[in-house]
Image (cartoon, grey):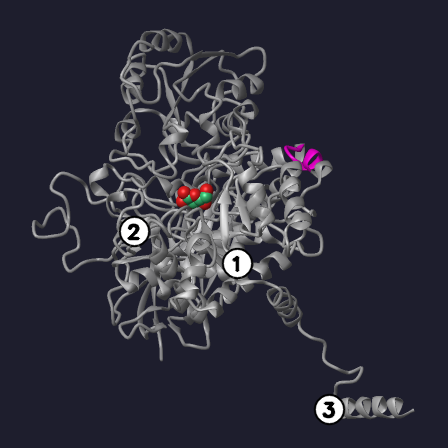
Amino acid sequence: MKKLASFLFVLIILSLFGFSSNTPKKSEDETLSERVDSVLSLMSLEDKIGQLNQLSFGIGWGPTIKVAVPDEYKELIRQGKVGSFLNAVGAEFTYELQKIAVNESNLKIPLIFGLDVIHGFKTIFPVPIGEVATWQPEIVEMSAHYQALEAASAGIHWTFSPMVDIARDPRWGRIMEGSGEDPYLGSLMAAARVRGYQENLSDLNIIACAKHYAGYGGAEGGRDYNTVDFSERTLRDVYLPPFKSAVDAGALTLMASFNEIGGIPSSGSKYLLTDILRDEWGFKGFVVSDWGSIGEMIYHGFASDLKHAGQISLNAGLDMDMESRAYITHLKELVDEGKVDEDVIDESVKRILRVKFLLGLFDDPFRYCKKEREQKNIMTEEIKIAALEVARRSMVLLKNEKNILPLKKTYKKIAVIGPLANSETHPLGGWSAMGDSADVTTVVEGFKKYVDKKTEILYSEGCKIDDNSTKGFSDAAKVAKKADVIVLCLGEGRDMSGEAWSRSSLDLPGKQEDLAKELYKTGKPIVVVLMNGRPLSINWLNENVHAILEAWFPGVTAGDAIAKVLFGDYNPSGKLPATFPRTVGQVPIYYNHKNTGRPGDLKNHYTSKYLDLPLTPLYPFGYGLSYTTFNFDNIKLSSNKLSNEDSLIVSVTVKNTGNYDGEEVVQLYVQDLVGSVTRPVKELKGFKKIMLKRGEEKTVQFTIHEKDLRFTAADMKFKSEPGMFKVFVGNNSVDVLDSQFELTE
Ligand code: BGC
């Protein structure tokens, strides 16, 4: 009785304070934190350190990834000395590993499996720079969705993607993995990829990892891993926005980069990993190092040994150690010596456990390891159709003289020539996970499938991608002479862009340009198809061949997509996400540069220019043709003033003036004419891809708000400044209409 009375008393008191049935429900975040804390409370220091350790099965990507579990790894899992693996692939294999973790380790904490799913797991989509050339975030999101679906069905929880590094130097081979040179375009694509991978974190999604944080694309000389040194303003206004955008889109992990910036390696930068990422942006996920990047701080000359490196990284806010083994080897000792606080370790562990909870691994550690799903969801017809859709939209028409394209279906003989004409491996591009060359449709195959019996497809390799032999030239010329038109497939090898694949030249490798010159002598029309992972300097081609299609590395549907585009089943609509220089000597060359005090002027000697080059690039940022033509006219502003609360509408009339239906990317740029710091000559602030039927006209509108005009001002605050702005609208960053407005106080 007494007990009941006191129970009632408690209930009354609780209801007075609003804790009865009306008790506000705990937020999901609170419940999650409690669950995380309850696991943490069971963990010894050794268990905690184990969660911070990530190990790999094999090195790199591709179907060569090993699948046997070494005894050493079994033991480490049993002892709770590893929290994550990368490169462990397959529903069955990851099941084996997970089983050891949840059945045989002390605390039964599930493992998290990561893989570089960069542009496809098995069904390979175009390389990322190609996907971005669609200028369609929704298409990029769809691609990420299917990549996730395949990977998740093969036991993968986590992709080391998107790579959101801005790249202004095409010598840097990793330009292929990113979104090119522009922070606005890069930010939209970063968010689209995060959404596509993570969606609602069901067991058919995977978590994203925005990398490489930060500044990695600024490597001096375009040489991978090289020193980076730019101003804080450039860091904040150019290199960080895509990371911020990925974080805002919910990215659950980030990867610290290999490079230093201004003397501080990112993997040891508290400023990047804690002050900006957590304190300014409120990031709640965890940060993984790049492969061995903690240990590499020794070579940077920033840490005296591995132990010191571990101390710096952990204290800076780097949570998980990928393959340096600095944490697993030294953290315990560092805590004992008082150099690392156990509370700091706790924070890192909590961030990792939180993600494991969000992935549902504590509820069902095997939810990603289901053999039936692997068989059902990989390389389905639906995914292949999606890959083809992305591939044809990724292609950029760089030249089309005398309307040689689309190819006539009445041609009797077409010569498909070149080292990339019948290649099964190169169209996959780099970082192609479990992609298999056997699944690739080559250009020759694509053409044969496409044409009817009346057209013959002839083939000759002509030369290799990158050697000095011209032996194949005569056969190629012989084949070319028989044909009505030559489709010449040139470019780079898939292993010439990507990590550690920097080039000092942007010319076509080997004897490929000479092959083009040889075929030119036949007098036959030449259509060049380029496959490559970076902007190339292709002046001779630009001047001499009839048409050029930039196809990037299109993935498994390469030949089908190229045939459809060249025959006009799809009218190309891609635009360049990075400037194509005339020669490597112009690099870095990017559209959103500063004016300088002496803007380049060929007629004036003391101006900023080269003696031996025009001022312009070969093809500017945002450039790309169509089989039809578009006319831009009548730029109008809803007002010539914009106040902080208001918005301004910019409109323009676009008309399809050619002979085909087609899509156009209408691009909006602004220039802040006077600032407390100098401002770029143009900055992309919006774009819309529209479809216009032949003869059709549309008015396209953009809305500009004050917040779109912000930048890191002289006082280092991110804000706009009142004054005059120019606004430009066009179909690339150079051919534009312009107007002006004033931003008022
Ligand atoms: C690369 C990362 C990649 C990691 C894991 C590193 O060498 O820089 O981009 O995610 O390896 O494969």
Image position, residue 124 (x, y; %): 54, 34
Identified at 49% across, 70% down, the residue is 343
Quadrant in the picture for residue 581: top left
**Gap between marks 2 and 1 measured at Cα:** 25 Å
Q: In this view, does 104 lie above or below 544?
A: below
Q: Where is mark 1, residue-wise?
A: 46
Q: Say what amino acid the circle numbered 3 marks.
A: Phe
**Gap between marks 3 and 1 measured at Cα:** 42 Å
**Neighbours of disc 2 within 10 Å: few (<14), some (14-19), many (20+):** some
Q: In this view, does 241 lie above or below 656?
A: below
Image position, residue 195 (x, y; %): 57, 54
Q: Where is mark 3, residue-wise?
A: 17
Confirm whether the magenta stretch covers residue 378: yes
Q: Say what amino acid the circle numbered 2 marks.
A: Ile
- Of all residues shown, which one is farthest toward the right? 1
Q: Which numbered circle lies on residue 298?
A: 2
Identified at 80% across, 82% down, the residue is 21
**From this viewpoint, is residue 265 visible?**
yes
Region in magenta? 374-380
Q: Say what amino acid the circle numbered 1 marks.
A: Glu
Disc 2 residue: CB within 8 Å of ligand 1 = no
The mark nearer the N terminus, 3 or 2, is: 3
Q: Quadrant of the C terminus?
A: bottom left
**Gap between marks 3 and 2 measured at Cα:** 57 Å
**Neighbours of disc 1 within 10 Å: few (<14), some (14-19), many (20+):** some
Image position, residue 188 (x, y; %): 48, 55
Q: Which of 491 and 504 is in front in this view?
A: 504
